Image: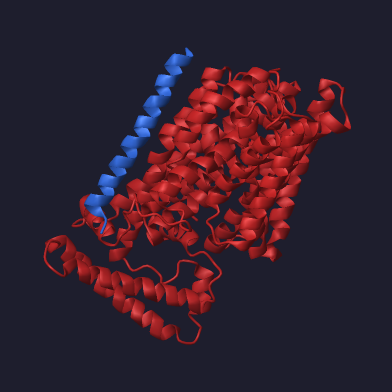
Amino acid sequence: VTERRWNRIYAAVALYLAAIIVLFALFTRSYNR
Amino acid sequence: VRPLDWAVLVGSLVFIVLFGMWKSRRTSTTKDYLLAGREMPWYAMALSIMATQASAITFISTTGQAYVDGMRFVQFYFGLPLAMILISKVVVPAFHGSGVYTAYEYLERRFDAKTRALVATIFLIQRGLAVGVALYAPAIVLTVIFGWPDQWTTLLMGAITVAYTVMGGVRMVTWTDFQQMLVMMAGLATALGMAVWMLPADVGFGGALTLAGAAGRLNAVVTSFDWNDRYNVWNGLLGGMFLALAYFGCDQSQVQRYLTGRSIDQSRLSLLFNAVAKIPMQFLILLTGAMVFVFYMFEKPPILFQPRELERVSQAQGFGEVAARYDRAFEARREAARRVLQRGGEAGVEADFQKAQRELDGARKDASALAGGGFSDTNYVFLTFVTTQLPAGVVGLIMAAIFAAAMSTISAEINSLATVSVIDIYQRFARPGASDAHYLAASRWLTLLWGAYAVATARFGRGLGSLIEAVNQLGSLFYGSLLGVFVVAFFLPRVRGGAAFAATLAGQAAIFAVAKFTNVSFLWFNVLGCLVVVATAWLLSLRSPPTPTR
């Protein structure tokens, strides 16, 4: 796998993390009091 | 513990060890023993990394954490994927390319022998302090819950783990970790499934989320900032990233997992698997705790989950009043919970529920205070649920998972302690130039020695009580400077050995000072120690030319 391909994978992982945090924040907002 | 539980527990232990023995049957050189011949596939390393990180206490207490405090603990892992990206990009190619056996060996190539020796010693102290606790802490919990003598639990767990680690080295450790992680995942999935399934029929999963949320247990993201509180999204991202960088990038007990990789790509994949899988897994563990919390809204839990403390406190003066208050609060909360489910939108319904919850928490706190405090009730929540509510077989599976969690952590730790002792100290300073067979034998002996040391500190650490926990926390004081010296190695080409050595000592001094004189959460020690090391090394090297790359 080339280094450029790896950089794209890293970007995807970072996006995934952002998505998870947003999802958890929505989860917290809709259920937690 | 019923016969079926014993069968599941013993069966899984035996299978895991036999599988590991079969997988590691070709171990004839030091490179085999310490690096698995550098031929591990990514999935074995990925689960080994995960299993090493998950200690038995993490496994036992995380669910309890959600019960007592809610899910905000999950934020602690938000920095982990970022750390994994940085390590994959920078650290993995550097370690793989230089063909080192340990992270600290790399420091000699970059700096000098004294920096390597200093950092290897810091690792040996820090891991050496922790390894006994990894064995002792779960033994204590199992003793209290099952009444087994903790001397025997420690010895049994310790002896099996040391025996197979001595026998097969890192290949054995990796393949047993792999199986042990699968057992843990099976245990966790079953626990979550059972917790949801055992909710009253009219509550269901959706109702349970409503109730857990109304009690403030679904606080997965907290955005308010507080320096002294490690569980908010900012501390989780930044502090958690530094902690994960130190742990996965500079701690040989983790570095050795991915040094065994067949290639840079395989090692990177194993780390990125953890980057993706870790947070959802922790979320599900905490969700299990939240479901157990809701289960105990309709089935009265003991006022304290630690059975020995409960027995002691029930004889204390004033306990009758606290217990009566607890009973009333429980009834009130149960009624209020039903009302929340039936007509949650109406004014005052949720407030009544939360008031009852506060009273219940208050009574629990008072009972804990009557017992004199000084113990963690959180560690006993999940196991109390498991042993009193779950059917035969499932209890055995969860026990097998706890054993697996303890053994996978300990095996990796003694394996890495032995590796650093042999490669960075013995071979480098005491006995250079001996034959490969000699170092292989030395590795086996040192594994045995570190294993015996772990069992001994766990067995005789009993009398030390909370001191051993204090010592364990002391161990976490070393990470910042460890991380700092590696950051310098990778990013500041001008810095030479002398400056790196002095900067590491300066970072260590700074952390000790902050720990002694301030209240700052320990998560920030890593950030601070790292920054002090980097700044000192940079200042000391302003005038030196860049180091030629070797």
- Quadrant of residue A32 within the rendered picture: bottom left
Task: Please tell me which residue is depicted at 65% across the width and 30% down the height of the picture.
Answer: B489
Q: Which chain is red?
A: B
Question: In the drawing, does residue B342 fall left or right of residue B44?
Answer: left
Question: In the drawing, does residue B452 fall left or right of residue B389?
Answer: right
Above-or-below relation of B241 to B295: above
Q: Residue furthest top?
A: A2
Q: Is residue B385 visible?
A: yes
Task: Count the labels in the image.
Answer: 0
- Quadrant of residue B448 within the rendered picture: top right
Above-or-below relation of B145 to B38: below
Instruction: Tell me residue B131's x, y (percent).
Output: 66, 47
Instruction: Tell me residue B68's x, y (percent).
Output: 40, 62
Q: Which chain is blue?
A: A
Above-or-below relation of B334 to B108: below
Instruction: Tell me residue B532's x, y (percent).
Output: 62, 44
Question: In the drawing, does residue B22 fall left or right of residue B108?
Answer: left
Colour scheme of the rendered structure: by chain
Q: Residue furthest bottom?
A: B317
Task: Please tell me which residue is depicted at 31% across the width and 54% down the height of the picture.
Answer: B218
Which of these two is toward me, B63 or A6? A6
Instruction: Tell me residue B189's x, y (percent).
Output: 38, 42
Q: Is residue B150 visible?
A: no
Question: In the drawing, does residue A22 fall left or right of residue B515?
Answer: left
- Quadrant of residue B127 within the rendered picture: top right
The quarter of the rendered structure image containing the C terminus of chain B is top right
Q: Residue furthest front?
A: B543
